[in-house]
Amino acid sequence: METLLPETTTYSVEYAPAVVELLEKKAPVALGVSGGKDSTAMAFATMAYLDSIGHGGPRILIHSDLGRLEWKASLPMCQLLASQLGLELIVVRRQAGDLLDRWLVRWQNNCARYANLESVRLILPWSTAGMRFCTSELKTAIICRDLVERFAGSTILSASGIRSQESPNRAKAPIFAPQLKLSSKTFGTCGFDWHPLLRWSLEKVLNYHQFCNFPLHEAYTRYGTSRVSCVFCILSSLADLLASSTCEENYE
Protein backbone atom coordinates (compact mmCIF):
# COMPACT_ATOMS: atom_id res chain seq x y z
CA MET A 1 0.00 0.00 0.00
CA GLU A 2 1.38 3.39 -0.96
CA THR A 3 1.33 6.34 1.39
CA LEU A 4 -1.92 8.21 0.92
CA LEU A 5 -1.96 11.91 0.31
CA PRO A 6 -3.15 14.08 3.16
CA GLU A 7 -6.38 16.01 2.86
CA THR A 8 -5.80 19.56 1.67
CA THR A 9 -7.99 22.65 1.82
CA THR A 10 -7.75 22.93 -1.96
CA TYR A 11 -9.10 19.42 -2.48
CA SER A 12 -11.47 19.08 0.48
CA VAL A 13 -14.64 17.03 0.15
CA GLU A 14 -18.25 18.06 0.68
CA TYR A 15 -20.10 16.63 3.66
CA ALA A 16 -23.14 17.25 5.85
CA PRO A 17 -23.23 17.19 9.67
CA ALA A 18 -25.07 13.86 9.52
CA VAL A 19 -22.16 12.38 7.56
CA VAL A 20 -19.74 13.40 10.30
CA GLU A 21 -21.99 11.84 12.95
CA LEU A 22 -22.14 8.55 11.08
CA LEU A 23 -18.39 8.49 10.50
CA GLU A 24 -17.77 9.12 14.20
CA LYS A 25 -19.87 5.98 14.83
CA LYS A 26 -17.61 4.04 12.45
CA ALA A 27 -20.19 3.65 9.72
CA PRO A 28 -18.96 1.54 6.77
CA VAL A 29 -18.09 3.58 3.68
CA ALA A 30 -18.44 2.14 0.18
CA LEU A 31 -16.74 4.13 -2.56
CA GLY A 32 -18.41 3.47 -5.90
CA VAL A 33 -15.87 3.49 -8.73
CA SER A 34 -16.11 3.11 -12.50
CA GLY A 35 -12.53 3.69 -13.60
CA GLY A 36 -13.44 7.22 -14.70
CA LYS A 37 -11.91 10.48 -13.53
CA ASP A 38 -14.66 11.60 -11.13
CA SER A 39 -15.02 8.39 -9.14
CA THR A 40 -11.25 8.01 -8.94
CA ALA A 41 -10.80 11.54 -7.63
CA MET A 42 -13.67 10.95 -5.21
CA ALA A 43 -11.99 7.82 -3.85
CA PHE A 44 -8.64 9.56 -3.27
CA ALA A 45 -10.18 12.68 -1.72
CA THR A 46 -12.63 10.76 0.48
CA MET A 47 -9.94 8.42 1.75
CA ALA A 48 -7.78 11.44 2.65
CA TYR A 49 -10.70 12.99 4.51
CA LEU A 50 -11.53 9.77 6.36
CA ASP A 51 -7.91 9.42 7.44
CA SER A 52 -7.82 13.04 8.59
CA ILE A 53 -10.76 12.54 10.98
CA GLY A 54 -9.61 9.15 12.23
CA HIS A 55 -12.50 7.17 10.78
CA GLY A 56 -12.30 3.66 12.20
CA GLY A 57 -15.03 1.94 10.21
CA PRO A 58 -14.68 -0.40 7.24
CA ARG A 59 -14.02 1.02 3.78
CA ILE A 60 -14.25 -0.66 0.40
CA LEU A 61 -14.25 0.16 -3.29
CA ILE A 62 -17.17 -1.27 -5.25
CA HIS A 63 -17.56 -1.51 -9.03
CA SER A 64 -20.58 -2.72 -11.00
CA ASP A 65 -19.39 -4.42 -14.17
CA LEU A 66 -21.93 -4.01 -16.99
CA GLY A 67 -20.24 -6.63 -19.16
CA ARG A 68 -19.73 -6.28 -22.92
CA LEU A 69 -20.57 -2.57 -22.94
CA GLU A 70 -17.78 -1.67 -20.51
CA TRP A 71 -14.50 -0.23 -21.68
CA LYS A 72 -11.97 -3.06 -21.38
CA ALA A 73 -9.68 -0.76 -19.38
CA SER A 74 -12.28 0.15 -16.74
CA LEU A 75 -11.89 -2.85 -14.42
CA PRO A 76 -8.06 -2.73 -14.55
CA MET A 77 -8.23 0.98 -13.65
CA CYS A 78 -10.39 0.12 -10.64
CA GLN A 79 -7.93 -2.61 -9.65
CA LEU A 80 -5.02 -0.18 -9.92
CA LEU A 81 -6.90 2.30 -7.76
CA ALA A 82 -7.62 -0.36 -5.14
CA SER A 83 -3.95 -1.30 -5.06
CA GLN A 84 -2.86 2.30 -4.61
CA LEU A 85 -5.42 2.98 -1.86
CA GLY A 86 -4.89 -0.34 -0.13
CA LEU A 87 -8.60 -1.16 -0.25
CA GLU A 88 -10.53 -4.26 -1.19
CA LEU A 89 -12.27 -3.95 -4.56
CA ILE A 90 -15.67 -5.60 -4.72
CA VAL A 91 -16.87 -6.30 -8.27
CA VAL A 92 -20.59 -6.98 -8.67
CA ARG A 93 -22.47 -8.14 -11.75
CA ARG A 94 -26.04 -8.95 -12.73
CA GLN A 95 -26.39 -12.70 -12.23
CA ALA A 96 -28.86 -13.09 -15.12
CA GLY A 97 -26.44 -11.60 -17.65
CA ASP A 98 -24.99 -8.25 -18.63
CA LEU A 99 -26.69 -5.10 -19.90
CA LEU A 100 -27.00 -6.42 -23.46
CA ASP A 101 -28.69 -9.54 -22.10
CA ARG A 102 -31.08 -7.34 -20.14
CA TRP A 103 -32.05 -5.49 -23.32
CA LEU A 104 -32.57 -8.76 -25.23
CA VAL A 105 -34.78 -10.24 -22.51
CA ARG A 106 -36.73 -7.00 -22.25
CA TRP A 107 -37.44 -7.15 -26.02
CA GLN A 108 -38.36 -10.85 -25.98
CA ASN A 109 -40.77 -10.33 -23.09
CA ASN A 110 -42.24 -7.29 -24.79
CA CYS A 111 -42.86 -9.19 -28.04
CA ALA A 112 -44.41 -12.08 -26.13
CA ARG A 113 -46.86 -9.76 -24.36
CA TYR A 114 -47.77 -8.16 -27.69
CA ALA A 115 -48.29 -11.54 -29.38
CA ASN A 116 -50.49 -12.70 -26.51
CA LEU A 117 -52.57 -9.49 -26.77
CA GLU A 118 -51.46 -8.51 -23.27
CA SER A 119 -50.12 -5.23 -24.63
CA VAL A 120 -51.20 -3.03 -27.52
CA ARG A 121 -47.87 -1.35 -28.10
CA LEU A 122 -44.23 -2.31 -28.31
CA ILE A 123 -41.77 -0.47 -26.08
CA LEU A 124 -38.09 0.21 -26.62
CA PRO A 125 -35.86 -2.60 -25.34
CA TRP A 126 -32.87 -0.39 -24.60
CA SER A 127 -32.28 2.34 -22.04
CA THR A 128 -33.18 5.95 -22.76
CA ALA A 129 -32.60 9.23 -20.95
CA GLY A 130 -36.05 8.82 -19.42
CA MET A 131 -35.68 5.08 -18.69
CA ARG A 132 -32.23 4.62 -17.22
CA PHE A 133 -32.85 1.14 -15.88
CA CYS A 134 -29.23 0.42 -16.85
CA THR A 135 -28.23 2.57 -13.88
CA SER A 136 -31.05 1.69 -11.50
CA GLU A 137 -31.07 -2.08 -12.14
CA LEU A 138 -27.47 -2.91 -13.05
CA LYS A 139 -25.64 -0.43 -10.85
CA THR A 140 -27.59 1.00 -7.92
CA ALA A 141 -29.72 -2.05 -7.11
CA ILE A 142 -26.90 -4.58 -7.44
CA ILE A 143 -24.41 -2.48 -5.47
CA CYS A 144 -26.92 -1.82 -2.70
CA ARG A 145 -27.85 -5.49 -2.47
CA ASP A 146 -24.22 -6.42 -1.92
CA LEU A 147 -23.67 -3.68 0.67
CA VAL A 148 -26.77 -4.66 2.64
CA GLU A 149 -25.60 -8.26 2.92
CA ARG A 150 -21.98 -7.30 3.54
CA PHE A 151 -22.68 -4.75 6.29
CA ALA A 152 -25.68 -6.30 8.06
CA GLY A 153 -26.81 -4.33 11.10
CA SER A 154 -25.10 -1.14 9.94
CA THR A 155 -25.94 2.32 8.67
CA ILE A 156 -24.07 2.46 5.36
CA LEU A 157 -22.58 5.42 3.51
CA SER A 158 -22.46 4.88 -0.25
CA ALA A 159 -20.23 7.50 -1.88
CA SER A 160 -20.14 8.33 -5.58
CA GLY A 161 -18.33 10.88 -7.71
CA ILE A 162 -21.22 12.78 -9.29
CA ARG A 163 -20.71 16.52 -9.76
CA SER A 164 -23.29 19.28 -10.09
CA GLN A 165 -21.46 20.66 -13.12
CA GLU A 166 -22.24 17.55 -15.15
CA SER A 167 -25.95 18.11 -15.81
CA PRO A 168 -29.04 20.06 -14.68
CA ASN A 169 -30.31 17.03 -12.79
CA ARG A 170 -27.06 16.54 -10.94
CA ALA A 171 -26.98 20.25 -10.15
CA LYS A 172 -30.08 19.57 -8.04
CA ALA A 173 -28.59 16.61 -6.20
CA PRO A 174 -27.98 16.93 -2.45
CA ILE A 175 -24.65 16.20 -0.80
CA PHE A 176 -26.32 13.59 1.41
CA ALA A 177 -29.64 11.77 1.02
CA PRO A 178 -31.37 8.55 2.16
CA GLN A 179 -30.91 5.59 -0.17
CA LEU A 180 -33.98 3.36 0.19
CA LYS A 181 -32.27 0.42 -1.49
CA LEU A 182 -29.87 0.26 1.46
CA SER A 183 -32.75 -0.27 3.89
CA SER A 184 -33.47 -3.88 4.82
CA LYS A 185 -35.49 -5.26 7.72
CA THR A 186 -34.00 -8.69 7.07
CA PHE A 187 -30.42 -7.50 7.41
CA GLY A 188 -31.09 -4.62 9.77
CA THR A 189 -29.56 -1.93 7.59
CA CYS A 190 -30.26 1.56 6.40
CA GLY A 191 -28.08 3.85 4.36
CA PHE A 192 -27.39 7.07 2.59
CA ASP A 193 -25.93 8.32 -0.68
CA TRP A 194 -23.01 10.70 -0.20
CA HIS A 195 -21.60 12.95 -2.95
CA PRO A 196 -18.21 14.22 -1.70
CA LEU A 197 -17.24 15.92 -4.99
CA LEU A 198 -20.61 17.49 -5.75
CA ARG A 199 -19.31 21.04 -6.14
CA TRP A 200 -15.95 20.20 -7.72
CA SER A 201 -15.24 21.52 -11.21
CA LEU A 202 -13.86 19.45 -14.07
CA GLU A 203 -10.62 21.42 -13.85
CA LYS A 204 -10.32 20.58 -10.15
CA VAL A 205 -10.84 16.87 -10.83
CA LEU A 206 -8.16 16.83 -13.53
CA ASN A 207 -5.73 18.80 -11.38
CA TYR A 208 -6.32 16.41 -8.51
CA HIS A 209 -5.39 13.45 -10.70
CA GLN A 210 -2.06 15.15 -11.32
CA PHE A 211 -1.72 15.95 -7.63
CA CYS A 212 -2.28 12.26 -6.80
CA ASN A 213 0.01 11.17 -9.65
CA PHE A 214 -2.66 8.74 -10.83
CA PRO A 215 -3.23 8.07 -14.55
CA LEU A 216 -6.43 8.85 -16.38
CA HIS A 217 -8.44 6.16 -18.16
CA GLU A 218 -7.34 5.61 -21.76
CA ALA A 219 -10.84 6.57 -22.91
CA TYR A 220 -9.75 10.15 -22.18
CA THR A 221 -6.07 10.08 -23.01
CA ARG A 222 -5.99 7.78 -26.05
CA TYR A 223 -9.46 8.09 -27.56
CA GLY A 224 -10.49 11.58 -26.51
CA THR A 225 -13.84 10.95 -24.84
CA SER A 226 -15.16 13.36 -22.22
CA ARG A 227 -16.58 10.67 -19.92
CA VAL A 228 -16.27 7.00 -19.07
CA SER A 229 -19.48 5.01 -19.02
CA CYS A 230 -20.77 2.34 -21.40
CA VAL A 231 -18.77 2.43 -24.61
CA PHE A 232 -21.84 3.51 -26.59
CA CYS A 233 -23.91 5.11 -23.83
CA ILE A 234 -27.31 6.47 -24.86
CA LEU A 235 -26.45 9.68 -23.00
CA SER A 236 -23.14 10.20 -24.80
CA SER A 237 -22.53 13.15 -27.07
CA LEU A 238 -21.96 12.55 -30.77
CA ALA A 239 -18.29 13.42 -30.27
CA ASP A 240 -17.94 10.77 -27.54
CA LEU A 241 -19.72 8.14 -29.63
CA LEU A 242 -17.42 8.84 -32.57
CA ALA A 243 -14.37 8.72 -30.29
CA SER A 244 -15.51 5.43 -28.77
CA SER A 245 -16.01 3.95 -32.23
CA THR A 246 -12.29 4.36 -32.94
CA CYS A 247 -11.45 1.75 -30.29
CA GLU A 248 -11.52 -1.70 -31.93
CA GLU A 249 -12.02 -3.45 -28.58
CA ASN A 250 -15.40 -1.75 -28.26
CA TYR A 251 -16.78 -3.90 -31.08
CA GLU A 252 -16.01 -7.20 -29.33
Image (cartoon, helix red, strand yellow):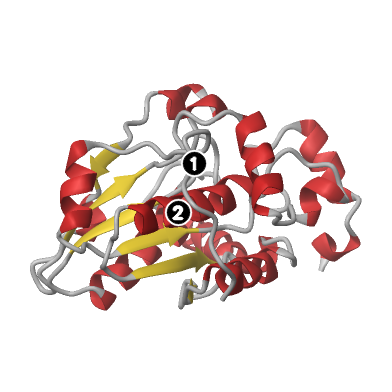
Viewed as shown, does residue 161 lie left or right of 40? left
- Residue 241 at x, y percent in the picture: 79, 41
Viewed as shown, does residue 78 lie left or right of 251? left
Q: From the viewer's perspective, is residue 71 above or below residue 148?
A: above
Circle nearer the N terminus (1, 2): 1
- Residue 11 at x, y percent in the picture: 51, 38
* The disc label shown at residue 228, or none: none
SS category of the residue bearing label 1 = loop
Front residue of this view, candidates 39 and 54: 54
- Residue 225 at x, y percent in the picture: 78, 42
SS category of the residue bearing label 2 = helix
Name the amino acid, label 2.
Ala
- Residue 34 at x, y percent in the picture: 58, 57
- Which residue is painted at 71% across and 46% down in the image? 210
| Quadrant assignment for the N terminus | bottom right
- Which residue is painted at 68% across and 63% down in the image? 74
Badge 2, how many Cα within 10 Å: few under 14, some, many 20+? many
Residue 116 visible here: no
- Which residue is painted at 46% across and 28% down in the image? 199
Does the residue at mark 1 contact the one at mark 2 (Cβ under 8 Å)?
Answer: yes
* The disc label shown at residue 48, or none: 2
Viewed as shown, does residue 200 lie left or right of 175? right
Q: Mark 1 = which residue?
A: 8
Front residue of this view, candidates 161 and 188: 161
| Quadrant assignment for the C terminus | bottom right
Name the amino acid, label 1.
Thr
Residue 124 visible here: yes
